[in-house]
Structure formats: structure tokens, C-alpha cells
Image: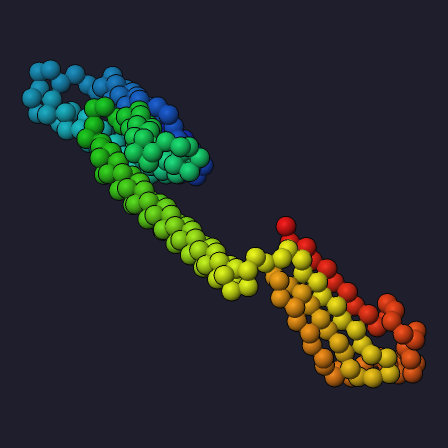
Amino acid sequence: VIEKASKKIEDARRKIVDENSIIPDFGAQAEQIISTAIEEFSRSAPSTSDDTVASTAYALKLSELETTLDAPLQVLYLRQLALLREQALSSYRSASKASESSDYEAMLAADAQFLRGAESSTRKSSAWTYDSERSHLQNVMNEFAQTTKKLTETRIQSSQQQSTAMQFLQHQQQMIQQLQMQLYGQSSPWNVGVAYRIPDTNFNLQGSYQQGRANFQLSCVPDEYAPMLGPNGFTNGVGPGNLGLSLNLSI
């Protein structure tokens, strides 16, 4: 009797432990394994109706048989509960990230998913319980929700600080522009720059007109490429080789 039941238990162990697969009706299968073994043992046992001692020994053997088969099945039951817990936790994390629903709703859905699987995995006529695994699942989901909430608050706070800093910089820029307008009047949209090197000299003339102000600069900068271009460069006088011009119009 025990040998036949052990083969069925080994099949369940291979699926749950080796393959990490969940048996949907594991509770009913466990109940069937033990009930079948007890029935077969009862049919093969001699009649004990008139013998009190034999009747007591028979009842003891039935209890031992049920205990012997229940122990490995309960181990598989606890392993299946762990798989159900991880499955529910994965569903909760996916729902909380991909859906706009609240963490509370995602927790309820994950808890209900675990509860359905745990109920179908529990052997009805046993002392098996899934309260510990369910409590652990709820604690993990609560910790995950709190961590997610803190990260969201940190991101919002950082975004608000950046927005405040940008508003401050924009305000300062507006104040600077207003001061410039008060000091120099309405600024011109034209920005012009001119640079000219006097031929056969190291003198460089630069002029610019920006925001209504003109600037002129004379500098002495040696021409490092003069030996390569010859004594007068490519051309004599004003030309593209010694005249630079830039124009920027702000609208």
C-alpha cells in the first residue's frame, strides 16, 4: 500500500520540486492518495469486530499509515505554497508597474490569486495551513509598495526642485535684460562682428556690434601661417584670405 502511494508522491515531487511547476488540484490529489491507501489497507486487514485489542491495533495502524503518507505530502504542499507566493508577487509587481491602478488594488488581486491557489492545494481533512505564507506575501508587498512610494516622492521632489531652479534662473535673466534696457535702451536685434589683419604686419583689427553696443579692438597676433602663404599671402589688399565677417540677427 505504501509503495503504491509513494510512487504517486514521487510523481508530484518531480513536478513541484524538480520542474518548479504548480499542481492546480494538489490538495485533492493528496487527499485521494491517502484515502486510496487507507481503503486498500482496510480491505486487506482481517475483521476485528469481536476483538477489542485487534480493533485498537488496527486503528493505530491506520493512524500511522496516514501520518506516514501525510508527512512527505505536506513538505510538497509547503514547496507549492512558496511557488504560489512567488507567482502572486510577480503578478503584483507587474500590475503595479504596468497599470494605472493603485498599489492597494494590485495587492488585493495578488492576495486573491495566492488564496485561490492555496485553497486548491490544501488537503481538506488535514491540519495544513497557509497562513504563514500568506502573511509573508503581504509583508513583502507592503515593503515593496513603501519603497516605490518613497522613490516616487523623491522623483517628484527632485523635479520640483529643478523646476524651481529653472524659474529662478529665468527670473534672473529677465531682471538682467530689464536692467540692460534701462541702462542702454532698447537693444538691437543685430549682432555683427568684423575681423581684419593688416597685410605684412602682425596687427589684427576686430570690431563688433552686439545688443546696441559697439566694440573695437586692436591686437598684435603673429601669423603662424605667413611663411606658408608667402610675403603678401594669397592676395594683396582686402580679400577672403585676410578678412573675416560674421552676422547674427536675433528675432
Residue 21 relative to residue 185: left or right:
left
- The answer to which image quadrant residue 43 occupies is top left
Would you say 133 lies left or right of 155 here?
Answer: left
Display colour scheme: rainbow
- The residue sitting at 36% across, 51% down in the picture is 157
- For image coordinates 83% across by 84% down, the residue present is 201
Residue 238 lies in quadrant:
bottom right
Q: Position of residue 154 (x, y in %)?
A: 36, 51
On the image, the x and y values in percent for residue 99 come to 42, 32
Q: Position of residue 109 (x, y in %)?
A: 33, 29
Position of the N terminus by quadrant: top left
Would you identify the image quadrant in which residue 229 lies?
Answer: bottom right
The one nearer the camera, 153 or 1, is 153
Q: Nearer the viewer, residue 62 or 13?
A: 13
Residue that appears at 67% across and 65% down: 209
Residue 49 placement, left or right of 196:
left
Q: Compared with residue 190, is residue 147 higher up or lower down, i.e. above or below?
A: above
Tell me residue 62's x, y (percent): 19, 26
**Above or below: residue 103 compared with residue 57:** below
- Exactly how many numbered labels are in the figure? 0
Q: Is residue 14 visible?
A: no
Q: Is residue 237 visible?
A: yes
- Residue at x-position 51% and y-position 64%: 183
202 to the left or right of 210: right
